[in-house]
Structure formats: C-alpha cells, structure tokens
Image (cartoon, grey):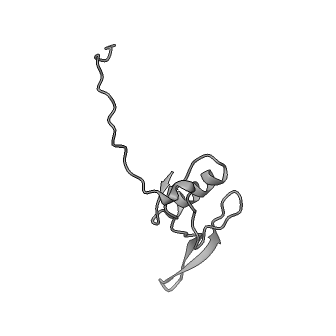
Amino acid sequence: MLVDRDTASASEIVTGALQDRDRAEVVGTRTFGKGVFQEVVELSNGGALDITAGQYFTPKGRNLGGRGVQTGTASSRTWRPRTTRRPARTRPCARR
C-alpha cells in the first residue's frame, strides 16, 4: 500500500489494519497520524460543539494519534512509476 503524510482517517486505519495482519506491505512515508474522531453536537441556540469522541486503534492496539502508520523497510526509497513497457501483442484477440 502506497501512503504519504497526507494519508489520514479511514485510509490510515485500513493501512494500519492491513499492516498489523501482514496483509499488505506499506511503502512511502509515515501517514498523517489523525488518531481521533469527532462528534458534532448541535445546540439549541444554533451553535454546535465539536467534541473528540474517540480514538482510532489498529487490531494490535496501536494508537495512530500523532505517530501515524510507519512504513516498512522500503520507506527510505522513493516510489517511482514502472518505466519498462510490456511487449505489444503479436496476434489479435479472439472475437466471440
């Protein structure tokens, strides 16, 4: 999974869960580290309160707040798109 410092919220939680379960290699840079979620309470006078209602944890109990998800051993490398081209098809596709 390719992540960077702007990876946050749901994508960060999924990344941490996949990493904890050894279901994906995480490459890129450390994620944002959101770690909490808010709940908006509307007030009778028309105002609102934005209250921190909870924290995000990965399946192994890591709190993402402030630290984010650390990337694997490949994190020191910069991701580059693949530059090699696949060979052109030599015969046409079969029609149905």
Q: Is residue 48 above or below residue 56?
A: below
Q: Is residue 4 above or below residue 82?
A: below
Residue drawn at x 56%, y 49% as measured from the top left = 25
Is residue 89 or residue 59 the one in the foreground?
89
- Left or right position of 21 against 38: right
Provide residue 31's location: percent of width, then percent of height.
52, 64
Q: Is residue 90 above or below residue 21?
A: above
Looking at the rendered image, the quarter that the C terminus falls into is: top left
Residue drawn at x 55%, y 59% as measured from the top left = 71
Provide residue 53's location: percent of width, then percent of height.
63, 73
Is residue 60 or residue 29 the one in the foreground?
29
Provide residue 70's location: percent of width, then percent of height.
57, 62
Residue drawn at x 32%, y 35% as measured from the top left = 85
Is residue 83 or residue 51 the one in the foreground?
83
Residue drawn at x 69%, y 57% as measured from the top left = 59
Q: Quadrant of residue 62?
A: bottom right
Residue extending farthest to the bottom is: 45
Is residue 22 or residue 55 the one in the foreground?
22
Q: Is residue 61 above or below residue 21?
A: below
- Left or right position of 23 against 31: right
Q: Quadrant of residue 72?
A: bottom right
Q: How many marks overall?
A: 0
